[in-house]
Amino acid sequence: MKRKIQQKKLKEVEEIKNLANKYSVLGLVDMTNLPSLQLQRMRQQLRNTLYLKMAKKRLIRIALNQLKDKENIKEFNDKLKGEAALIFTNENPFKLAKLLGKEKSSAPAKAGQEAPNDIIIPAGPTNFTPGPVIGELGQLGIKTEVKDGKIAIKEDKLLVKEGEVIDKKAAEILSRLGVEPMQVGLNLIAAYEKGIIYLKDILSVDEESYVNNLKQLGLDSFNLAMHIGYTTKDTINQLIQKAFRDSNSLAESKDIVTSESIKKELSKVDKEAEVLKEKLNIEVSETKKEQVKEKVEESKKEEIKEEKVEVPKEKLKEVKEAPKETKEITTEELLKDAEEETKEDREKLEKEKKDKEDIKKAEEKLKELTDKAIQEKK
């Protein structure tokens, strides 16, 4: 009978060794307080991803110690604790940890259990009314105060550190506060891959924070490369643009003629010419208006004077009988006179316009000659 039991144990050891050589990743899990129903459900859901092997810790230690060709396997073997089991998979350790984490569920703590993580009582209001519970919380070092007729916790309190045993008082208070610190599921303690041991704190990665850290590292490296002028496929375009801007700034500060500086100067001249043209047109237009207005006012004044002239009675009859030779000056005639008077101004403007066109042509010719000289110099 003893011989059969010994053969069974040897067979389990050989099976563990064969699985460790077959799969690339070896995981060590603790199944303490894991309900059998949940264990069966998890094995069913993950059967295409991993293989779960349950055995006594003594047999697991023997099997792992015999894997002499695997680097650091002894250190991995030392992580065995609780109701240990082995996971064999070809998934990378981080994906394995993520898969097992999704299958976990929260549960209340029981006296005598080990804390899977640091158990912290957060600050904030509770549902307790003032009474003996204040003293119970105080015994555990939890600071309280009364707000709006309820007990409130003044500040966060680390109640149980990771790995410590949860006592009866702590378990009761956690239950009354509704804190469920335990994670029911396959608790991954460590993972082994090609001689590297990944512990639980390393495998529990916040993906969002990890991605943000990578982005920040990329930005920092880009800024550093730009600062020291290090050329890469990501910085080459920006470095060329920066060099172009710096060279133009230097040319402007030293009055060095380049194709870019000539373009800027010509653009500046064009803008000034446009402003001058608009200004001259406005001034001429205003001058015309004032001249017409003065003519109309003078005409009205003459009419008023004529109306106020007194005619002697003895001459009144002769004036009435005499034919009227006075001719009224109309507004149209005044505008026509004003237009003729400003004809000279228009001719001057046309001359100025022609001069500007000649200047522009000369500038274009200068630019062409300058570009040609620069090219020949290069």
Image: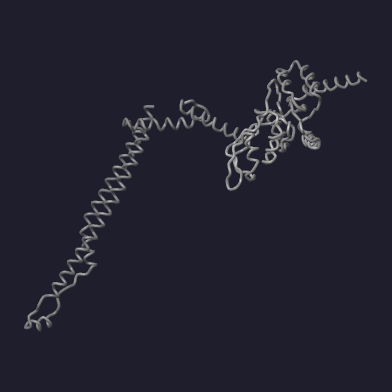
**In this picture, residue 261 sits left or right of residue 214:** left
Q: Position of residue 119 (x, y in %)?
A: 65, 33
Residue 339 location, quadrant: bottom left
Quadrant position of the C terminus in the picture: top left
Left/right of residue 49 with respect to residue 264 in the rendered view: right
Tell which of 194 and 197 is nearer to you: 197
Residue at the extreme top of the image, as rendered: 68
Figure colour scheme: one colour
Quadrant in which the N terminus appears: top right
Identify the residue at horizontal 28%, vertical 51% (top origin): 279
State the residue at coordinates (22%, 54%): 345
Residue found at the far right of this picture: 1
- What is the x, y in percent for residue 312? 7, 80
Q: Would residue 184 appear left or right of 132 to someone viewing this image?
A: right
Q: Quadrant of residue 181?
A: top right
Between 282 and 183, the one nearer to me in the picture: 183
Residue 93 location, x and y as percent?
69, 28
Name the foreground residue: 102 vs 164. Answer: 164
Give the residue drawn at x 19%, y 63%: 294
In this view, 326 is above or below 253: below
Q: Residue 208: x percent and y percent?
A: 61, 36
Residue 372's quadrant in the figure? top left
Above or below, comparing residue 136 to residue 376 in the picture: below
Residue 337 position (above or below residue 142): below
